[in-house]
Image (cartoon, helix red, strand yellow):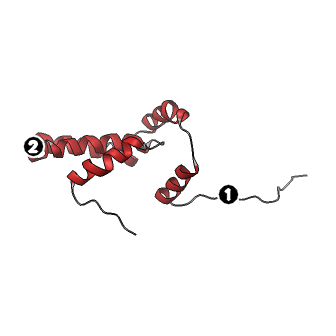
Amino acid sequence: MKYQLSSYKDIDRVLIPFLEEFPLLTSKYLNYLDFQKAIEILKNGEHLTREGIEKLKELAQKMNTNRSFKDKWEFTQKHCSKAVITPEWIQGFTDAEGCFYFFIGKQKIKG
């Protein structure tokens, strides 16, 4: 199944309220906040001006891997300690981030 949002209006009407009700629990929440700002720029028509384009560029330049470790760490320390990890969260995290697994094996003892 594929669910697709094809306009910023759909993103504002469907995705933003969903993510407000079910917020991200990792530092990706910081990207969401910047993404939300970008949607506001589009809604207000600011993207049609040079200043609006510059605002969008600034937001994009600090998202994802461009965000500093310090910003991610500080956010995680404040925000994620309050998180309740449910089975649904684990499923969503796994679906979005790839996979995670664990291994139980025999411990090698050095003698």
How far from the left and from the top, in percent, is residue 45?
A: 11, 44
- Looking at this view, is 44 or 99 the one in front? 44
Label 1 sits on residue: 102
Please provide percent x and percent y for residue 55. 19, 40
Q: Looking at this rendering, what residue extends furthest in the left direction?
A: 49
User: What secondary structure is marked by label 1?
Assistant: loop
Whole-angstrom CA distance, mark 1 to mark 2, is 49 Å
Q: Are marks 1 and 2 in contact (CB under 8 Å)?
A: no
Observer-nearest residue: 22 or 55?
22
Left or right for 71, reference 91: left
Q: Residue at x 15, y 45 (%)?
A: 53
- In the image, residue 4 lies at what x, y percent? 30, 63
Q: Earlier in the sequence, mark 1 or mark 2?
A: 2
Disc 2 on helix, strand or loop? helix
**Disc 2 target residue:** 50
Work out whether residue 67 can be spotted. Answer: no
Q: As displayed, is residue 78 above or below residue 106?
A: above
Q: Quadrant of the N terminus?
A: bottom left
Q: Amino acid at mark 1?
A: Phe
Position of residue 96 measured from the top left corner of the image (x, y, whole percent): 46, 57
Name the kind of residue labelled 2 in the image: Arg
Mark 1 is surrounded, within 10 Å at the Cα level, by few (under 14), some (14 to 19) or many (20 or more) other residues, namely few
Residue placed furthest toward the right: 111
Q: Quadrant of residue 52?
A: top left
Residue 44 appears in the picture as rendered: yes
Asked whether, in this view, residue 63 is left or right of residue 6, the answer is right
Q: Nearer the viewer, mark 1 or mark 2?
A: 1
Residue situated in front as seen by the camera: 21 or 80: 21
Q: Residue at x 54, y 52 (%)?
A: 88
Q: Which residue is at 26% across, 49% downward?
A: 13
* Residue at x-position 49% and y-position 59%: 95
Q: Is residue 100 above or below residue 25?
A: below
